[in-house]
Each structure stands twice: as structure tokens, then as C-alpha cells.
């Protein structure tokens, strides 16, 4: 599974302009999860991460490469939750290493779908997540109460990792939070769009799109993303689709 590898490389390059705090995964430190969406009213909020008008980006990259993702860890670029005093730009990027063998693309795809689903099942207390899949943004309202109780990205990150690791295909999870306004959020937003385009193409392929590149609307993505055509032709060979 190499489709997202270039994106992971690019993400690391963008973030190399900043400095990271890193924590290893410790499930015991995970922030309490309410198990259901909570409403944090504006009047109860300390601030918003990724508020409208500020940079915001959210995406997941999946790989089978242990060179690219080898650990369960939380990384933070920028100030932590208790240091933030007003709305800031925000990105949450998740890098997943999945344990299915190269070539078993249908399994990877199924795992991806499960994993996508899991992202809607994390509800840290006092940390209201609003996602906007069309614009690839994620906006968080953090309650004053949670700040008083000591919420921080390490605890929230541990909660996310725990959720992703419930999927048996997931071997390692790196959760990256970005609040440093000097990071290139436009570039992170572009990456979110690309990650979405890759996942979308993969979905079409798995749903039986015929392998005819000459009339295919997805050609631009396939020309750019290494491994996509090979994946489609590999699946096309197995099925009844005509092979080019
Ligand atoms: S490999 Fe060709 S047919 Fe398949 S999605 Fe890409 S461009 Fe379309």
C-alpha cells in the first residue's frame, strides 16, 4: 500500500519547518471519552482550533511501510491546549500503518473504510469536534472546564490512537496536531484534498470502475499517484473488466 506514501513524505517536509513535541502512546493517559457527541456552547468555550477564517486541515494517510510509520505516538507542532489563549489555526493528521500484505488491495480498502468510520467515534470530553469533509477542515471547540481539568494534546492524542488501534489491521498510529501559525496550512489543506482524491479514486476502483484510462475522469490523479494504476489493473485482471 503505497498510494499515500508521497503525501506522508510531503507532510513531513512541510512540518520540518517547525519543532515537535513527541509523546509515546500511553493508553492510561487517554482523555475521558463521552461516547457520544457533546455540545460545547460558545459561551462555555475557551477558544476554537481551526476556527473559520483560520487555517484548518484534516487527513489520514495509510501505508504498509514501517519506515514511514513505525511507532504509536503523538506529535505536536505549536502551543499545547493550556498555552493557547485565543483561536488558532489547526491541523490533525493521522498516519496509519496497516498490517495487510502488499497486493491484498481489497483488504486494505476494507480496512480503510473501517478506519474512516472510526474517526467519527472519538468524543473527548470538553473537546467538540466539527468536521467538514467537503472543505477538509476540522474545527474544535475546547471548553473552559476541560482546560481547568488539564486537557492537553497528549491526552487527546492517546484517545485517538486507542480508537484507531481497535481495528485489528492497524499496527501503528501517529497522530499529529499542528497549532503553530508559522506552518504552511495552505499546503496542509492541499494535502488533505489530495488524500481525499486518492481515497475517492480507490473507492471507485473497488466499486468496479472499468479499466479504461482513455475515458476515465480520474486520470489526473492516477498519473500523479504512484501505484494507483497498478492497483486498478491488478484488480481489473482478476475481474471481468477489459484490461488496457
Ligand atoms: S487506472 Fe486508468 S481507468 Fe483506472 S482509475 Fe486510473 S485512470 Fe481510471
Image (spheres, grey):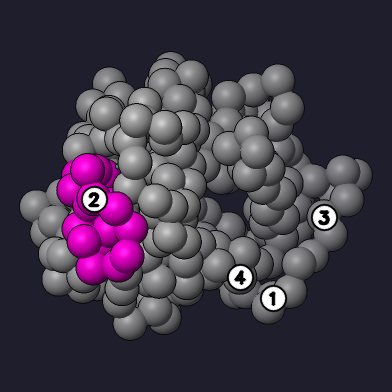
**Is residue 207 something one can see in this rendering?**
yes
Mark 3 and mark 1 residues within 8 Å of each other at the beta carbon: no
Q: What element carries label 4?
A: helix
Question: Which residue has dot 3 on it?
Answer: 40
Q: In which quarter of the image is the C terminus?
A: top left
Neighbour class for label 2 at 10 Å: few (<14), some, many (≥20)? some
Residue to which mark 2 is pinned: 243
Who's the residue at 75% across and 42% down the image? 46
Whole-number angstrom distance, CA of label 3 to CA of label 4? 17 Å
- Judge by depth and name the residue closer to the eye, 30 or 109: 109
State the CA–CA distance, disc 4 to disc 1: 10 Å
Question: What span is in magenta?
Answer: 227-244
Dot 3: element: loop
* Disc 3 to disc 1, C-alpha distance: 13 Å
Q: Mark 1 points at which residue?
A: 34
Q: The residue tagged with tag 2: helix, strand or loop?
A: loop
Labelled disc at residue 217: none
Residue matched to label 4: 121
Q: Could you tell which of marks 2 and 1 lies nearer the N-terminus?
A: 1
Query: How far is disc 2 from disc 1 in space, using C-alphas?
Result: 49 Å
Comparing 168 with 13, the one in front is: 168
Badge 3 or badge 1: first in the primary sequence = 1
Amino acid at each position: 500500500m503505497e498510494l499515500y506514501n508521497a503525501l506522508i513524505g510531503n507532510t513531513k517536509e512541510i512540518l520540518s519547518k517547525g519543532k515537535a513535541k513527541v509523546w509515546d502512546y500511553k493508553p492510561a493517559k487517554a482523555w475521558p471519552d463521552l461516547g457520544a457527541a457533546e455540545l460545547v456552547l460558545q459561551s462555555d468555550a475557551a477558544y476554537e482550533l481551526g476556527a473559520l477564517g483560520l487555517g484548518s486541515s484534516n487527513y489520514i494517510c495509510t501505508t504498509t511501510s514501517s519506515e514511514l510509520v513505525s511507532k504509536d505516538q503523538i506529535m505536536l507542532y505549536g502551543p499545547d491546549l493550556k498555552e493557547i489563549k485565543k483561536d488558532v489555526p489547526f491541523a490533525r493528521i493521522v498516519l496509519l500503518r496497516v498490517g495487510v500484505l502488499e497486493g491484498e488491495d481489497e483488504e486494505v480498502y476494507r480496512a480503510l473504510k473501517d478506519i474512516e468510520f472510526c474517526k467519527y467515534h472519538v468524543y473527548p470530553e470538553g473537546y467538540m469536534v466539527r468536521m467538514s469533509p467537503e472543505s477538509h477542515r476540522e474545527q474544535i471547540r475546547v471548553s473552559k472546564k476541560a482546560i481547568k481539568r488539564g486537557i492537553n494534546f497528549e491526552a487527546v492524542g492517546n484517545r485517538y490512537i486507542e480508537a484507531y488501534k481497535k481495528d485489528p489491521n492497524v499496527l501503528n498510529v501517529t497522530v499529529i496536531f499542528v497549532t503553530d501559525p508559522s506552518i504552511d496550512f495552505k499546503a496542509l489543506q492541499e494535502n488533505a484534498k489530495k488524500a481525499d482524491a486518492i481515497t475517492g479514486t480507490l473507492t471507485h476502483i473497488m466499486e468496479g470502475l472499468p479499466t479504461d484510462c482513455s475515458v476515465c475522469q480520474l486520470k489526473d490523479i492516477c498519473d500523479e499517484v504512484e501505484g494507483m494504476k497498478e492497483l486498478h489493473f491488478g484488480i481489473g485482471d482478476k475481474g471481468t473488466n477489459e484490461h488496457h
